[in-house]
Amino acid sequence: MSEPPAVRLTRLGVRFGERVALQALDLTVARGEFVALAGPNGSGKTTLLRALLGFVAPSEGTVEVFGTPVASLSTTERARRVAWVPQEEALRDDIPLDQYVLYGRYAHHRRLDGDSREDRVLVERILADVGLADRARDGLLSISGGERQRATLARALAQQSPLLLLDEPTSHLDIAHQLDLLGRVRSLARNDGVTVLAALHDLNLAARYADRIVVLSRGRRVADGPPKDVLSEDLLARVWGVAAELAVDRQTGLPYLLPRRLIEEKGPAPSTLLPGPVHVVGGGGSASPLLRALSNEGLRVTAGALHLLDTDAETADALGLVAAVEAPFAPLSDATRAHHRVLLGEAAVIVVAPFAVGPSNLGNLEDITPFVGRTPTLLVDPPSGPAWDFTGGAATRARDGLRAAGAEPVPGTEAAVRRVVERLARPTVPSPAGPG
Amino acid sequence: MPFVYGLEVIVQHLSGGALFPDPCAGSGMTAARCGAYAFIVWDIYLPGVLLALIVGAGLGLSGAALQGVFRNPLADPFLLGISSGGTLGAAILYVYHVGQGNADVYLPVFAFVGAVSTGLLILAVARGRYSSVETLLLTGVAIANFLSAVLSLVLLYNPTGSEQVTFWLLGGLGLADWTVVEIAFGATLALGTLLCLFGRELNLLQLGSDVAQSAGVDAARTRLQVILLASLVTAVAVAFTGIIGFVGLVSPHIVRRLSRSDYRVVLPGSAAIGALFLLGARDLSYLAFPGSVLPLGIFTAFAGVPFFLFLLFRQRRLVTMGGGT
């Protein structure tokens, strides 16, 4: 008969009122394994650790440590099996470090016991292990943050529990102390057979130290395995909504992620990862729904040439888009038109919004013309009702000219967005005449 | 030599008459005068001293326990309304003339019941789903205010009882006799010893209930037990002496200052400091105002507040227990 694993969660669900913190979570951690728990804020990492500590009661499923349901253990019995290092401990009294570490022996004492000789020897050894032997008599409030976190680890180790839980233990530490602490934790797992389950924000640190990474998202397990199998650009995009590059550390052979930018972010920051740019020509509010819809698709969007204070200009500004802009109500200047042509030239797709054209912005239509042959251009049909041509026919002629040159008419915003996405998905293949 | 003579009286009593069988013999006093002296020393002076020591110890101890369990240097039996409950119990006795024929017996009983029920009420309210240290503390403060209001109301409509109640509110050792000393000693010793066993738990609770819990302390149960015991110890004190402020607040601070923040030391240490503090306050009040019966509660505040402020400003560390670090 094989011995039961350190941790076994079966269909674990935890609910706080309406909010589901964990759902249908199955997880087994073998003895001596170092498992990193990763996931965005609110994904359930801390709840999982707290369930293992018996702090939160499962609404369904079971939590077992070393083959025994946590709920059936008394507080001291559980403390002898599971120890915990919180993110930061509320230390208020300036007690000497060795006394603080001795507090960790609580679960091994009976009520009237004093601190035994064995306890003191053990504490001395643990303090030496975490590199604090020479600080044993110093007050907790007089040592540095990094030393304090090591002291907390020492207090947890004094429990001599075979399962060690860490909740973001490095989040308040500088890089040197992060490496130091996680290195010590890993050697506990490797050399002393301690099972470690650590919630870690930093995926690269997790990859470097843990044997296995378990990724949680919205209370579910979405990835699980050795770091090199789990870490991927796709995972970061899916779970964290972050565009990242995956590289391999030539020294260790381990993967590391280089986060580039938020996928929802509407910034002018150049990125080879986001498709586009899509350039929208508009004015008077006609382009605003398009700008928003295209940005929501995760595309890079530019706009022009717009007048300041115009609704479209403000929308572009709110979305953080690059736009060619002109002073309010002024005819388009040569400089603005030149900027506009640059944006048109960079565009992967051009969308012409159904904007009203007067003498001051007729230049917009004229500037598009040379690009129609080279860049896929969509022409959103102007509404049939209200007049849009205030140029005595010049604008209508210019639009007809665009259509004749190969611009594709689309009936509205939704259809335009759909066609843009299709165009970008197959940039080189001429698209068949689709619906809309 | 009244002092030596007083000692002779005490030794005579303690030895059952084997030593100094007749202290009056060498005193040069008339037999009647000497008998009165002996009575004063043995039946009035000594019970007063002992009650001051016992009540001081009880208040110091429960103050330390409550500060520990609430992780708050302001917590003491008065802040939490436990003492107000005792006063309300006493007020009901005076105002409604319940069992006044036998006030010696009923007064402590009423005060005790009042104080203990307040402690239980706080626990009952805070046992609910959202019990945290903060809820408990605020519940106590709210109940203390509520009880003060009830007391004011009762006194407003029953001015006849208010004089006795006022004296009660101010606190004093006037009820001291040997029976009182024996009861107070027995109860305080038993409950106080139990309370002193919670040093380890209180140490860990200072790190937060979650950490304490992870290290094996049943935080919720420990809180219940400590608050219950502290209420009982306070109730014993309040029952016999009325409200004597400041001993519970200041004693633990002195111990932490003198020694360290290990509750295995702070709990018994606060009992010792509390005992000395109250005895000192009693003697100083006699020295400062000879012949008058200045209520002890007033004197502890007069002596305690400047001393407390001195401590606070001399070493700010003292308050880090409750403040951020």
Image: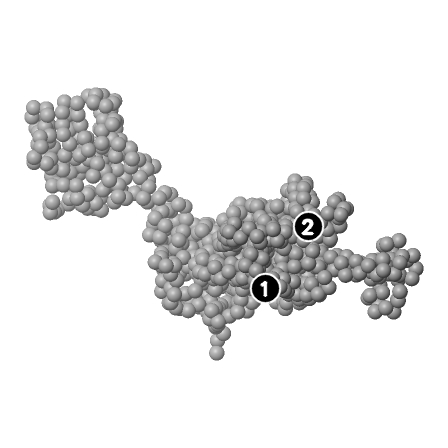
Q: CA distance from mark 2 to mark 1?
A: 26 Å
**A108 left or right of A167 in image:** right
Check disc 2 and report the residue beneath it: B296
Q: Which mark is residue B99?
A: 1
Are dots 2 and 1 in contact, CB under 8 Å? no
Q: Nearer the viewer, residue A323 or A338?
A: A323
Q: Chain of mark 1?
A: B
Q: Quadrant of residue B183?
A: bottom right
Query: A241 or B185, which lies in front?
Result: B185
For the question of whether residue A249 can be seen, the reply is: yes
Is residue B71 visible to us here? no
**Residue A186, position as x, y percentages in the image:** 53, 58
Q: Residue at x 51, y 51 (%)?
A: B157
Picture quadrant where residue A311 is located: top left
Question: What residue lies at 32% left-to-right and 45% top-to-bottom?
Answer: A263
* Kind of residue indicated by mark 1: Gly
Q: Is residue B230 left or right of residue A40?
A: right
Q: Residues within 10 Å of mark 1 (few under 14, many from 20)?
A: few
